[in-house]
Amino acid sequence: MVDIDEITAAPSPDLLTPDNCAVLFVDHQPQMFFGVGSDDRTAIINSIVGLAKTAEAFDVPVVLSTVAAESFSGPIMPQLADVFPDQKIIDRTTMNAWEDVAFVEAVKATGRRKLVLAGLWTEVCVVLPALSALAQGYEVYVVTDASGGVSPQAHEHAVQRMVQAGATPVTWIQVLLELQRDWARTDTYAATTQVIREHGGAYGLGLVYAQAVIGAHAAG
């Protein structure tokens, strides 16, 4: 038990910050989307782009990877590529990204131990690298709404498997707000609220309304 006198207004080390995490996007490609049946695919695309813009807004390092882009799965989704036009895309033959040397080296190069992971499909291209990274001492945060499986059951069982192994399930907007955490952080306030307006659905519309009625500095 912690002595009450030792309690301070300090964040948990488990929280994501712009300085302690990297975001990994795995196999967000046309052929993979065709097989997704766990959720509305348009909603998943919105979540992926929202997560990408979150990483960009907070200058979080990202790793973009595809599987068999030229022979089977097609290019990375253009909405994602557009957010990171200068980012190298690592194409693999392995279903498990963690068995690809270039991918692992790119992750290591970020210098981050907390990995925010999203991909298609959840039950293959997310669960395999998640379990592999966990086994090597990384902390893995799976962005469930920016990932999709072939069925609701496949997606849910994969998430449960990762959680049982030690991964933490999150949503893209949870990542965004966890990185911001304080509306007094003016250096990222405008970017955060812009991402919410563009991809936050009803919450984004609510922010538009609040800023129109209350003023430009209405908090989220």
Image (cartoon, rainbow, N blue to C red):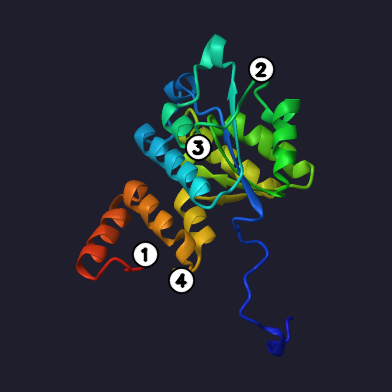
| CA distance separating discs 2 and 1 | 42 Å
Q: Residues within 10 Å of mark 3 (few under 14, many from 20)?
A: many
Q: Residue at x 65, y 23 (%)?
A: 95
* Label 4 sits on residue: 184
The image position of residue 137, as x and y in percent, is 78, 47
| Mark closest to the chain's N terminus, 2 or 1 | 2
- Whole-angstrom CA distance, mark 3 to mark 4, is 31 Å
Numbered tag placed on residue 220 in the rendering: 1
Residue 158, above or below 203 = above
Q: Earlier in the sequence, mark 3 or mark 4?
A: 3
Three-letter residue code for mark 2: Thr
At x 41%, y 37%, the residue is: 44
- Whichever of callouts 4 and 1 sits on the residue coming sooner in the sequence is 4
Identify the amino acid type marked 4: Ala
SS label for mark 3: loop
Give neighbour class at mark 1: few <14, some 14-19, many 20+ (Cα, 10 Å).
some
